[in-house]
Image (cartoon, rainbow, N blue to C red):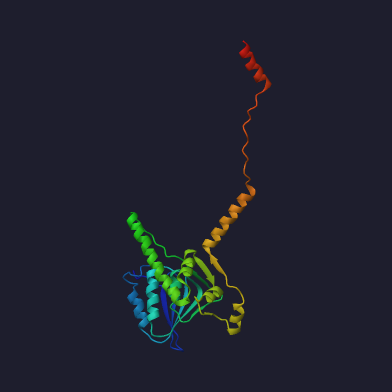
Amino acid sequence: MKKRKFWNWVRDSDTGERTLVLNGTIAEESWFGDEVTPAIFRDELTKGDGDITVWINSLGGDVYAAAQIYNMLMDYKGKVTVRIDGIAASAASMIAMAGEPVEMSPVGMFMIHNPATVAIGDKKEMQAAIEMLGEVKEGIINAYELKTGLSHDVLSDYMDAETWFNAKKALELGFVDKILFANDEEEKAMEAVEGMVFSQRAVTNSLLDKIKAQSKRYVQPVKPTAPDNRVSADALMSRLNLIVH
């Protein structure tokens, strides 16, 4: 059974330019399978020439597929414009870095996080998986760093926290170059508005801090009571009677 491709090429008959649509999961089925392969994508990319526009609306997917698409787009001879019309998250955000320029819808979202995998085996095999993920992360950071100019440590922290950016913040940090549908005056007005960023780790830590604060407020420590060593008069009389007799 023929596997479904996760991309679609559209030719603009008026200008001769081509449009690449990446919609949904990047390589939902095997990128290296019998039907859907890197070679097929490369053949379709190089079948024509001239400028291309890449529209992205994807939550991500296979990081290796995304890496190869990024490399092919970076190596393409024509101009590559990337437009994020919905979301570019995870592996899809790496593909977006191949655009020059990268344009983003004012209602779009951009997300970066650490790569993840599933592994089984003994301690040695688990350690190998950890080291592999570390190397994959470094490769992804290289793409972000090349586009944004942000430092390695800043990008690594954003990935550790699984960070979401709106269009304004993505523009501010250099992940995108322009906000779609906004003219020069509107972009200048947007610069006066602080961009928003959402961090999963920051939200979790904030919630934990609030829980701790509430616990300290409502749960008062119980003071230990001193042992009562007093003896009743009746008990003392009983003891005296025992001594007398």
Instruction: Point out the residue furthest to the top here.
Output: 245
Q: Position of residue 38 (x, y in %)?
A: 34, 74
The foreground one among 164 and 26 is 164
Q: Is residue 216 above or below residue 148?
A: above
- Horizontal side, residue 37 vs residue 212: left or right: left
Rendering quarter of residue 29? bottom left
Q: Is residue 195 placed above or below 121 in the rendered structure?
A: below
The quadrant in which residue 3 appears is bottom left
Residue 140 coordinates in the image, percent (x, y): 42, 70
The image quadrant that residue 133 belongs to is: bottom left
- Position of residue 113 measured from the top left corner of the image (x, y, whole percent): 46, 66
Give left or right: position of 221 versus 70: right
Q: Is residue 4 above or below residue 79?
A: above
Residue at 60% of width from left, 73% of height from top?
194
Q: Residue at x 51, y 67 (%)?
A: 163
- Asked if residue 23 shows in the view, the reply is no
Viewport quadrant of the C terminus: top right
Residue, far front: 244
In the displayed structure, does residue 212 sit left or right of residue 151?
right
